Amino acid sequence: MTDHQFGRFGIATGLDSSPHSLEAAQIAEDLGYPAIWLSGGPLPGLQTITDLVGATNSIKFISGVLAVVTYPAADVGATYADLQATAPGRFTVGLGGAHGPRPIERLTAYLDELEVPSDHRVLAALGPRMLELARDRSAGAFPFLITPAYTAQARQVLGPDKLLAVSHLVVLETDPAKARAIARDTISFFPTIPAYADSLERQGFSRADQAELPDHMVDALAAWGTPADIKAKLTEHLTAGADHVALNVITGITGPQPTAQWQALAPTLLTP
């Protein structure tokens, strides 16, 4: 497995350039998290990445992910070059979102144009063809909503020397009904996206499972319980071959960053 100095556990979240977001990034850094994966949907623009790097001292940022249909390769390359000059090694370009027909070909053409070294870019990869592209054209893969069993399959495709960073849902709640309700609400959106529906089916979750979201499926895709319970679940990915797990903490409440949950989890997750 590779070492991209992201540590074992990082954070996946959506941030912008607001004072609250900048403060949340600073809190994550102060708690000792080594990396933040910036969710592409909530990201208002590339300037936010520059602002977040400037507001912190050492924590690494990875776009997780920039949609290639939204961000021109020239703009992404320029942002990377500027940050590499002022804060070397603190921004890794994560790409995905090649929607529409022929997504592999579209992403390949984008990579051909992108002036970012292959070892400083990663791809959101779910299916085997995308994992192969990540292996051949980037530092590695950043899949989301996968089980540890699928992590092991992804490692086989990537080989031993590529980065495998997994984003996993986390609910800091010990009541099973409450925890599963929060996780189920988030998971329910993804089967409506064809790439995720196909990925879930490859993992053994039938279309009926995807419609009903039974407990066993929710438990496989979201870690919940005490910090120790959550660490044990996330560690299954590391045992299966992942280098890094990014915690996507969900609370069932829209709005503030879950900094209290990051703080509660840090002593358990960031201690060997």
Image: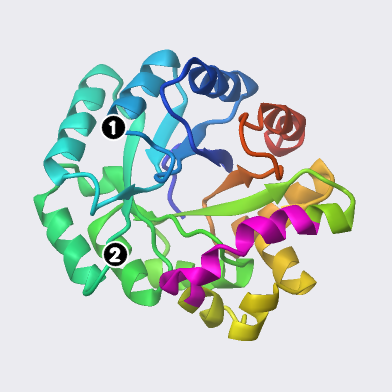
Residue 139 pos. (x, y %) = 32, 52
Residue 218 pos. (x, y %) = 72, 66
Q: CA distance from mark 2 to mark 1?
A: 20 Å
Residue stretch rendered in magenta on the structure: 180-197
Which residue in the structure is indicated by mark 2? 99
Which residue in the structure is indicated by mark 1? 46
Assign a secondary structure to mark 1.
helix
Image quadrant in which you'd find residue 250:
top right
Identity of the residue drawn at 54% across and 17% down:
23
Above or below 269: residue 242: below
Q: Verify whether residue 156 appears in magenta.
A: no
Q: Residue 191 has which mark?
A: none
- In this view, the residue in front, 143 or 85, is 143
Q: Amino acid at mark 2?
A: His
- In this view, the residue in front, 78 or 133, is 78
Q: Amino acid at mark 1?
A: Leu
- In this view, the residue in front, 203 or 197, is 197
Residue 143 pos. (x, y %) = 47, 59
Q: Main secondary structure of the magenta part?
A: helix
Residue 129 pos. (x, y %) = 32, 75
Above or below 11: residue 27: above
Assign a secondary structure to mark 2.
loop
Image quadrant in which you'd find residue 208:
bottom right
Q: Verify whether residue 183 appears in magenta.
A: yes
Quadrant location, the C terminus:
top right
Numbered circles on residues, count = 2
By what rule are the colours in the image chosen?
rainbow
Identity of the residue drawn at 32% across and 58% down:
97
